Amino acid sequence: MSKTKPLSLLFISGPNLQLLGRREPEVYGHDTLDDLYARAKARAAERGAALEARQTNHEGTIVDWIGEAPGTFDGILINPGAYTHTSIAIHDAIAGVALPTIEVHLSNVHAREAFRRHSAVAPACLGVIMGLRGDGYVLAVDAMLNHLERHAKR
Ligand code: DQA
């Protein structure tokens, strides 16, 4: 019987998300990033998948992590924080590696300031989950595993 390698996901959170828990709780909720990542990892484990959770405040580090992902990870989940609205470099990294990627936001960016309504990153992504606070981190895991189980050449 052939043994299939477990699916492996990379979850990247961008700038200022290390402040969750004390950062504008009326917008982002009271959970810390560790809380959200613990829930996402638990969900991945329930489905027999691995999840590596990272955070950085640096755009170039995000670009590096995406570029290095093929071969190690099957899919990427990313909350690019404020880089969502500006980063052609993150868009191009995602498009360049051609790994399925889901953009995640805790808040509903369309219900906030006008400058948050544009995503430079979303056109390179499979889909976007937003406005559901921490639940979005878990839903993104399910959505990506559903996608990979249906479509990935393994
Ligand atoms: C965010 C939304 C962005 O506009 C903001 O800059 C963030 C967090 C979210 O998760 O709702 O840092 O990505």
Image (cartoon, rainbow, N blue to C red):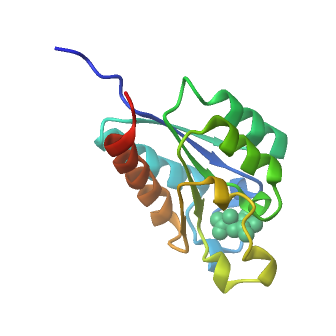
Lateral position of residue 144 relative to residue 27, left or right = left
Q: Quadrant of the C terminus?
A: top left
In the rendered image, the residue lying farthest to the left is: 1
Q: Quadrant of residue 41?
A: top left
Left or right side of 131 for 97: right
- Compared to residue 120, the image places residue 25 above or below, namely below
Image quadrant in which you'd find residue 98: top right
Q: Quadrant of ligand 1?
A: bottom right
Point 76% across, 39% down: residue: 63
Q: Is residue 22 visible?
A: no
User: What residue is at 79 percent from the left and 38 percent from the top?
Assistant: 61
The front one of 149 and 37 is 149
Task: For the N terminus, give its image quadrant.
Answer: top left
x and y percentages locating residue 11 in the rendered image: 57, 44
Tell me what residue is drawn at x 66 percent, y 76 percent: 109
Counting from the top left corner in percent of width and height, residue 42 is at 38, 45
| Residue furthest top as drawn | 1
Camera-nearest residue between 128 and 28: 128
Q: Is residue 38 above or below residue 153?
A: below
* Residue 117 left/right relative to 143: right
**Percent coordinates x, y for residue 82 in the rendering:** 78, 62
Q: Is residue 95 visible?
A: yes
> In the rendered picture of this protein, how many numbered marks are placed on residues?
0
Residue 132 on image: x %, y %: 50, 72
